[in-house]
Amino acid sequence: MQTTTLSFDNIHSHGRLFANLLRARHRTFIEQAHWDLPAADGMEFDQYDTPASRWVAVHDDLGGIKAGVRLTPTTHRCGIYSYMIRDAQLGLLDTIPRDILFGNAPIAPHIWESSRVFVCDDVPACDRTRVQLQLIGSMVQSARELGATSLIGLIPASGPRLARRVGLDCRPAGPVRDIGGSDSVAVTISMQTKMH
């Protein structure tokens, strides 16, 4: 199992890995979760997949995707959009409630958003925890290398338990809300603490 952090600068060096990641997102979010999201050629994407973002992919030697996450700086803007949680709070998104956060969405160079977090459904149950831990560890490492000291993101309501198991300081930043048919919560993740 390998992990690669993709950017517009390096996707040419990784063959079909980026396309495979977007196809895995299509399977996860459109085919299985039935979310109404943009797609083309079996790949899911949205307005936040820009050169400012980074994508962490957990994959096998042949580029088969096991898990992934997108990281976007909270300072980025593209037209009317900034990052998903802030745009939801501003009423720009129909699928995420405006009251997703307790306070105002942050805008700071040291805070990045984590979004489109997934583990593929074909990862065997005996490997899921290992894949999740690999994804979390690589997400934190990549975010730190980008200068982030904290992340903000939407995760399943049960997600903070897993984060605490690996030593992440993960705290609710908003109420539990039904998003796409499952209970989710906005969280902040401080990367000042060391993971186990």
Image: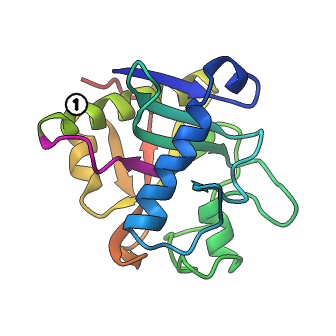
Is residue 83 in the magenta section? no
Where residue 51 appears, x then y in whole percent? 77, 39
Please name the residue shown 49% across and 43% down the image: 69
**What residue is shown at x 41% (from left), y 18% (from top)?**
61
Residue closest to the eye, 136 or 161: 136
Q: Amino acid at mark 1?
A: Arg
Picture layout, residue 123 above or below residue 182: above
Q: Specify the farthest residue to the right.
A: 79
Q: Residue at x 51, y 33 (%)?
A: 56
The part of the image, by quadrant, that contains residue 185 is bottom left
Residue 50 left/right relative to 86: right
Position in image of residue 101 (x %, y %): 51, 69
Query: Mark 1 Cα within 10 Å, few/some/many (few <14, many 20+)?
Result: few
Quadrant where the N terminus is found in the figure = top left
Query: What residue is pinned by disc 1?
Result: 130
**Percent x, y for residue 16?**
60, 30
Point out the stretch of residues depicted in magenta: 116-125
Q: Which residue ends up furthest to the left in the rendered image?
A: 126
**Chosen colour scheme:** rainbow
Q: Is residue 134 above or below residue 169?
A: above
Asked whether residue 154 appears in the rendered view, the answer is no
Q: Residue at x 71, y 39 (%)?
A: 109
Quarter of the image with the C terminus is: top left
Helix or strand or loop: what does disc 1 sit on? helix
Is residue 63 something that shows in the picture?
yes
